[in-house]
Image (cartoon, rainbow, N blue to C red):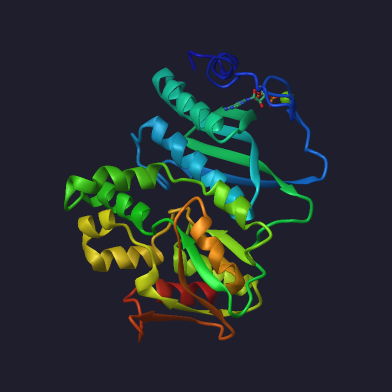
């Protein structure tokens, strides 16, 4: 590497943190960090591997936003407040344009979400990016997948399927380009629903972020909650007009149920919190109810239905 590892870290990642919780940041063998009194640490790591999660040549700023959004989304799903980030970079070469683009977008996002980059690792090899995020939770309070109760409202934030639409457009081209920018943005820059997660803490009985697809992720909640089931009204599943305009209603509905990586929150809420739903920082839709039948039943305008060759089967297979 023409740029030494030391120079690379100094130049692109070593900005000192001003956060009081960071006793010692980048530059020594470890960071030294203080968890505020009465809080616990929530920790999660996510990786993006070239060829598996993104195509060669993907602009570095888009990789930064995708990595950051997907990693912070796990904190949102627990109701945690983001605090620190560590970053493991495996790079084929120290490309300065790439590093500039990546590090400046990452710094921008860290600033926006009040996250301090406190350390990491830099190695040579096939392009792989890993972000470990750390957040705070009030002691013994957290949103988890377990805890859904029969009769809970099943809710989702934002719109589903857009990220899958963006990916399809990247791989196969967009049938109609008008909304391509919006769909690509949803794929490359998912919004971690931090504020929503914090509000739901102590109110929702269960929560997960949608990374594998609604049916698959909801099934994780139902399973973790002791083998419960769900009745879903498909017409209530929120789908953007942009996704429908670009790919038609059938694909849009399919992707809303089974497409992954929207990083919206799916949570179950006791019905007495119904009024809360109109006071949230993002639109939230009620799409069904938790039942005691260990099964997901789908209804479209009151009629039972199955989703062709996809989510529902996929859900069954995954759990078998
Ligand atoms: P060591 O060899 O002791 O593990 P390194 O030389 O790998 O230390 O790293 C030196 C310092 O730079 C450490 O504080 C480490 O956390 C930080 N660091 C290394 N790579 C990155 C990176 N990609 N982003 C942020 N900090 C990094
Ligand atoms: Mg060391």
Report whether 25 appears left or right of 223.
right
Residue at 55 percent across and 68 percent down: it is 274
Q: Position of residue 155 (x, y in %)?
A: 50, 66
Residue 144 vertical placement versus 127 (above, below): below
**Residue 41, quarter of picture:** top right
Report whether 51 appears left or right of 88.
left
Give the residue at the far left of this rendering.
176
Judge whether residue 158 can be spotted in this image.
Answer: yes
Residue at 43 percent across and 18 percent down: it is 96
Ligand 1 placement by image quarter: top right
Report whether 46 appears left or right of 179.
right
Residue 42 vertical placement versus 125 (above, below): below
How many numbered marks does the figure carry? 0
Q: Position of residue 242 (x, y in %)?
A: 26, 53
Judge whether residue 30 can be spotted in this image.
Answer: no
Q: Nearer the viewer, residue 85 or 52?
A: 85
**Residue 258, quarter of picture:** bottom left
Q: Position of residue 3 (x, y in %)?
A: 50, 14
Residue 11 vertical placement versus 276 (above, below): above
Residue at 62 percent across and 35 percent down: it is 85
Q: Nearer the viewer, residue 294 or 310?
A: 294
Q: Position of residue 129 (x, y in %)?
A: 51, 37
Residue at 38 percent across and 81 percent down: it is 299
């Amino acid at each position: 590497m023409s740029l030494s590892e030391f120079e690379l870290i100094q130049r692109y990642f070593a900005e000192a943190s001003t956060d009081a919780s960071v006793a010692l940041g980048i530059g020594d063998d470890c960071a030294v960090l203080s968890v505020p009194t009465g809080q616990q640490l929530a920790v999660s790591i996510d990786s993006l591997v070239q060829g598996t999660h993104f195509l060669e040549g993907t602009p570095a700023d888009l990789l930064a936003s995708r990595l950051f959004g997907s990693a912070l989304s796990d904190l949102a799903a627990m109701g945690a407040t983001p605090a620190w980030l560590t970053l493991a970079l495996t790079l084929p070469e120290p490309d300065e344009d790439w590093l500039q683009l990546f590090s400046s977008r990452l710094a921008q996002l860290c600033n926006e979400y009040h996250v301090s980059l406190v350390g990491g690792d830099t190695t040579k090899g096939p392009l792989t990016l890993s972000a470990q995020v750390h957040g705070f939770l009030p002691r013994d309070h957290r949103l988890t997948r377990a805890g859904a109760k029969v009769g809970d409202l099943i809710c989702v934030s934002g719109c589903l399927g857009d990220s899958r639409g963006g990916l399809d457009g990247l791989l196969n081209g967009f049938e109609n380009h008008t909304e391509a920018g919006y769909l690509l943005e949803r794929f490359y820059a998912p919004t971690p629903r931090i504020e929503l997660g914090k509000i739901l803490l102590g109110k929702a009985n269960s929560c997960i972020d949608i990374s594998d697809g609604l049916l698959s992720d909801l099934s994780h909640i139902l399973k973790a909650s002791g083998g419960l089931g769900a009745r879903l009204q498909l017409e209530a599943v929120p789908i953007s007009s942009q996704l429908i305009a670009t790919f038609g209603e059938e694909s849009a509905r399919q992707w809303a149920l089974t497409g992954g990586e929207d990083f919206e929150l799916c949570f179950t809420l006791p019905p007495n919190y119904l009024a809360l739903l109109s006071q949230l920082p993002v639109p939230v839709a009620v799409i069904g109810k938790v039942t005691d039948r260990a099964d997901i039943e789908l209804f479209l305008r009151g009629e039972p239905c199955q989703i062709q060759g996809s989510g529902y089967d996929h859900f069954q297979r995954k759990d078998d």
